[in-house]
Image: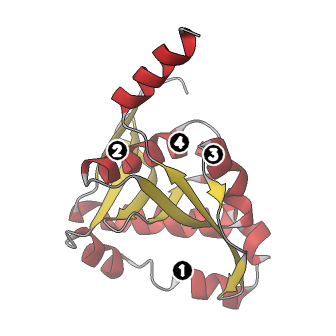
């Protein structure tokens, strides 16, 4: 990525662009999962409208963040205080350029600040390799919901200070 990426907490003013990013990412980037079936796409996107997103942004149990590149939103992600990463969506033209990874790392930091030691999520087939790359591992049988295959995954969250301690311990051996 040429320009610096900035991750910030989403605000109600971001609801419209968040809805558009999510919709585009689902329609274009997740075609392997929904196979362009209009009913599956409609089921997946119906709860991602601007009004739904505005309600999420006022819910203190949720955290939505936005990836900005030169002040242009390129991705969005959401987690809940329960430890669940609800989603991570990036504009298709920004796939595999670091935005998704930065968004998820920011969610994980927020979850650790809330005292959680583990994050969990349900991945699609499209996103499974991405989440594995970030350290998530399957933790239960795949299931189907709304015509989509979901892969339950989880990851232990390690505060940066513990990662540094682990690194110094392993290098001393």
Question: Residue tagged by mark 3?
Answer: 95
Report the mark closest to the observer, 2 or 3.
2
Establish if 92 lies above or below 101. below
**Mark 2 surroundings: few (<14), some (14-19) or many (≥20) residues within 10 A:** some
Q: Earlier in the sequence, mark 1 or mark 2?
A: 1
Q: Earlier in the sequence, mark 2 or mark 3?
A: 3
Which element is circle 3 on? Answer: loop
The residue depicted at 60 percent of the width and 87 percent of the height is 42
Relative image position of residue 63 (x, y in whole percent): 30, 60
- Alpha carbon separation for disc pair 4 and 3: 10 Å
- Alpha carbon separation for disc pair 3 and 1: 19 Å
Relative image position of residue 61 (x, y in whole percent): 25, 70
Relative image position of residue 38 (x, y in whole percent): 70, 87
- Alpha carbon separation for disc pair 1 and 2: 27 Å
Pick the quarter of the image with the C terminus.
top right
Establish if 159 lies above or below 47. above
Establish if 38 lies above or below 126. below
Q: Which mark is residue 148?
A: none
Q: Earlier in the sequence, mark 4 or mark 3?
A: 3
Question: Residue tagged by mark 2?
Answer: 109
Contact? badges 4 and 2 (CB < 8 Å): no
Q: Earlier in the sequence, mark 3 or mark 1?
A: 1
Question: Residue tagged by mark 4?
Answer: 101
Question: Residue tagged by mark 1?
Answer: 45
């Amino acid at each position: 990525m040429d320009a610096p990426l900035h991750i910030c907490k989403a605000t109600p003013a971001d609801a419209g662009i968040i809805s558009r990013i999510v919709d585009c990412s689902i329609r274009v980037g997740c075609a392997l999962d929904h196979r362009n079936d209009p009913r599956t796409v409609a089921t997946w996107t119906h709860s991602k409208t601007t009004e739904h997103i505005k309600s999420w942004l006022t819910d203190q149990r949720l955290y939505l963040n936005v990836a900005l590149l030169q002040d242009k939103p390129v991705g969005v992600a959401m987690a809940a205080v329960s430890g669940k990463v609800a989603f991570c969506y990036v504009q298709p033209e920004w796939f595999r350029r670091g935005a998704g990874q930065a968004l998820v790392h920011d969610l994980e930091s927020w979850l650790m600040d809330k005292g959680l030691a583990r994050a969990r999520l349900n991945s699609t087939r499209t996103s499974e390799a991405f989440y594995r790359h970030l350290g998530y591992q399957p933790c239960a049988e795949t299931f189907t919901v709304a015509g989509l295959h979901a892969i339950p995954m989880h990851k232990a969250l390690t505060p940066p200070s513990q990662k540094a301690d682990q690194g110094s311990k392993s290098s001393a051996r």
